[in-house]
Image (spheres, rainbow, N blue to C red):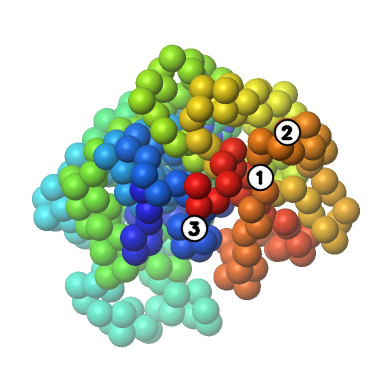
Amino acid sequence: MCLAQVCKSPINYTGNKYRILPQFIKYFPKNANKCVDLFTGGATVAINLISEEIIAIDNNPKVINLLMFLKKQDYSTLIKKIDTLIEKYGLSNSYKYGYSYYRQYVEGNNGLKKYNIEGYNRLKNDYNKLKNKKTDKANLYLYLLMVYAFNNDIRFNSKGEFNLPVGKTDMNKNNREKLKKYIDICNEKKIEFVCKDFKKIDIKDLKGVEFIYADPPYLITDAVYNENAGWNEKEERELLNLLDKLNKKGIKFALSNVLQKKKLNIKNEILYDWLEKNKDKYFINEIEYDYRSASYNKKNRDGLEEEVLITNYKVGE
Ligand SMILES: C[S@@+](CC[C@H](N)C(=O)[O-])C[C@H]1O[C@@H](n2cnc3c(N)ncnc32)[C@H](O)[C@@H]1O
């Protein structure tokens, strides 16, 4: 298994591994026929794995449903539906009419925000009113909301309502290309999306799996999926237990994480202890993070995170 040219997911997911994925080429095993992308998020890693079979797991039902919905679409049919919705809500379509058409509405560096705010809020209200968020209609609305949302992100409040304000961009060439590429990849590769809590994974379910990439929320950083104590010390320990079990079964794993925030002097003690106990079995591979273009928030960047990839195999073996 290796990674060819890195493709972007159509979902701009917080903490996605797009920028550091090229570095994984040298760290991931070369020939793994069945792989799991555990904590798949926007599926950036899953869609870039070259393997006969890929299972992408996450416990976020909205994101997994959206990825499954987009996967089964025919691009030309989908894009027609998207363009129809753009018209219906009076949103900008810089791909169709050109960006200069909207220039009179652009204020400062706010991009298309002013032009889209009213239509976007109507779209958001209509989406939030939908009773069943699993339908194709709900997923289509969610995709479009994300494209026009702040930072092209996905965020829900505790009531399950999409709650991001309008963003600066629209369904431009770049978003269309990412969407098309994703659908093409899903047609070419065998990728299965599974909505599951990692704690419910039974090792017996992993028959034939040769490699697992795990990208959990990081205990010492505060990304959105860490809010409301979604990820805590208990979860961290359970994940490390699962990795120990995988190791005993002879399944290769690679775990992304942050060992410490140097400037703030914060360490992930649980991870350090586990590595110390297993220093003959597990290996720390350093990852260089491009902080200038990071999508992480400023607080994290200032903390100078030590991003690592922990493997239970020596690189190159
Ligand atoms: C760092 S993000 C993964 C980003 C992903 N690798 C990408 O490139 O887009 C961590 C993910 O873990 C998921 N997650 C959090 N707790 C989980 C759990 N208990 N079981 C499964 N997934 C979980 C979150 O929904 C989130 O998508």
Q: Do we see residue 224 in this rendering?
A: no
Q: Amino acid at mark 1?
A: Phe
Asked whether, in this view, residue 189 is left or right of residue 169, the answer is: left
- Reading the image, the residue beneath label 3 is 26
Q: Is residue 32 left or right of residue 255?
A: left
Q: At 41% across and 22% down in the image, what residue appears?
A: 206
Residue 151 in picture, x, y percent from top left: 50, 60
Q: Residue at x 71, y 63 (%)?
A: 301
Left or right placement of residue 90 versus residue 274 in this view:
left
**Disc 3 from disc 1: Cα separation:** 14 Å
Q: Which mark is residue 162?
A: none
Instruction: Locate residue 127, reporting x and y percent.
Output: 36, 40
For label 2, the SS is loop
User: Which residue bears the numbered disc 2?
Assistant: 278
- Relative to 264, say whether 170 is above or below: below
Figure quadrant of residue 52: top left
Q: Nearer the viewer, residue 219 or 88?
A: 219
- Circle 3 sits in a helix, a strand or a loop, which is it? loop
- Tell me the residue at 32%/38% (across/down): 33
Type of residue at label 3? Answer: Lys
Task: Measure how far apart labels 2 and 1 are at the Cα level.
Answer: 9 Å
Q: Position of residue 61 (x, y in %)?
A: 42, 30
Residue 301 seen = yes
> Ligand 1: does it lie within 8 Å of the C-beta at label 3?
no
Q: Is residue 234 above or below residue 75?
A: above
Q: Say which label, 3 or 2, has the lower sequence index.
A: 3
Q: Which residue is mark 1?
A: 283
Residue at (45% x, 75% y) in the render? 111
Residue 299 picture quarter: bottom right
Label 3 close to label 1 by CB (< 8 Å): no
Mark 2 vs 1, N-terminal side = 2
Q: Dots 3 and 2: beta carbons under 8 Å?
A: no
